[in-house]
Amino acid sequence: MAEVMLTEVTKKFGDFVAVNDIDLNVGDATFTVLVGPSGCGKTTTLRMIAGLEETTQGEIRIGERVVNRVPPKDRDIAMVFQNYALYPHMDVYNNMAFGLKLRKIPKAEIRRRVHDAAALLGIEDKLKSKPRALSGGQRQRVAVGRAIVRDPKVFLFDEPLSNLDAKLRVQMRTELEQLHHRLKTTTIYVTHDQVEAMTLGDKIAVMKDGVIHQYASPQETYDHPENQFVGGFIGSPAMNFLNARVATEDGGVVLIGKGFRLVLPQGKGQDLPSEVIVGIRPEDLEGPAPNGENTMEMRVLVTEPLGNELLVYTDCGGERVVANLDPHRRVEVDSTIRLKVNIDTVHLFDRESDQTLL
Ligand SMILES: Nc1ncnc2c1ncn2[C@@H]1O[C@H](COP(=O)(O)OP(=O)(O)OP(=O)(O)O)[C@@H](O)[C@H]1O
Ligand SMILES: [Mg+2]
């Protein structure tokens, strides 16, 4: 077991900066997820940790050892790739045993490790099958099994579930969670799926343009995003953003935008700039509600009943606003509705810097 520490790590491809001066401290036995939009530098970061890509600058430490100059095979990591990279001509047993044979591990020990891993993953009856005879989920398990038998200090996963259909993805996600719970191996996991990030990670690093914008627990990134990008990336459907003017009335702070007027709780919102971006999560809108303080009027464009929730897409003063409402309320398309804003959970962002103000 080991912690993984990246200090001021940069990766350039020619003049292009793919990873820009990041710090990341992954605690021993913890599960960290790197999440962010396509091209933000997740895979590059993981490949640098694995040693498949050299760092341009900065230091990578695994346990007590600085590994910048250590070749991949000596870093004591195991990586699971998106495409699994199984050997098509070998059966499952040999796919899992291959790396151990290269390391000259005694035969009996290899047998024990492969059978243990296969039992853990529920693929004991597939050990003699070739990869082509396996389902996507089974192939995925073999790829994970191949990582487990190595008993590495660190697991690195790069989008291991993205080739699976939606249902299997959820199943394999919970299996990976259970696996981590049992093995407690330090894990760094890359995905662009924020639900996967939230459910798997002890901590998640939200990346964009080669920079980590926040590294915190899933709940912390949801409750207290450090900037507008994180606010919009974490949570589904995404947070609504509305422009507003800041005014003071009767000693309190009021946010005035097209079609809404929000009164902040007493004592909140002092020292705000004159214009801000208001962030309201769909689940922080309630209604339909009667006219009153901190309500917004909007025209319903589309409704999506999902059984457990009702998503309502609306136009509020020319801006799109999504609300997540009680599915048992009736909401008609093309009608005008009024929703109450949970003012205690409203987020405010700086228009210039994107940083969180409140
Ligand atoms: N070998 C390379 N040469 C040049 N540019 C590269 C190379 N590898 C990656 N890049 C660039 O670096 C950036 C980050 O790539 P990376 O693969 O790390 O993104 P990612 O976050 O994993 O994206 P995705 O979610 O699409 O897999 C991209 O703009 C990519 O084009
Ligand atoms: Mg990638």
Image: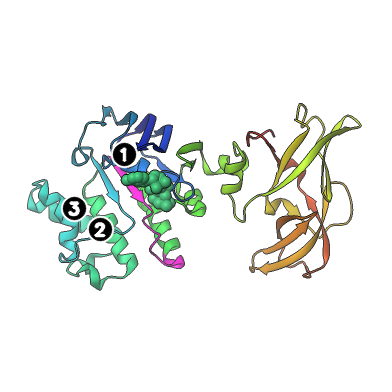
Q: Mark 3 points at which residue?
A: 113
For the magenta stretch, what is the residue range? 153-168
Q: Residues within 10 Å of mark 1 (few under 14, many from 20)?
A: many
Contact flag, marks 1 and 2 (Cβ < 8 Å): no
Q: Would you name the residue on which mark 2 appears?
A: 85
Q: Mark 1 points at which residue?
A: 48
Q: Nearer the viewer, mark 2 or mark 3?
A: 2
- Whichever of labels 1 and 2 marks the residue nearer the N terminus, that label is 1
Q: How far from the left and from the top, in percent, is residue 178?
A: 39, 53
Residue 208 magenta-drawn?
no
Using the rendered view, name the quadrant where residue 265 is placed.
top right
Quick one: SS at disc 1? helix
Q: Which of 278 and 152 is in front in this view?
A: 278
Q: Which quadrant is the C terminus positioned in?
A: top right
Looking at this view, name the residue that lies furthest to the front.
15
Other-residue count near label 2 (Cα within 10 Å), few / some / many at <14 / 14–19 / ≥20:
few
Up-down relation of residue 237 to residue 280 (above or below): below
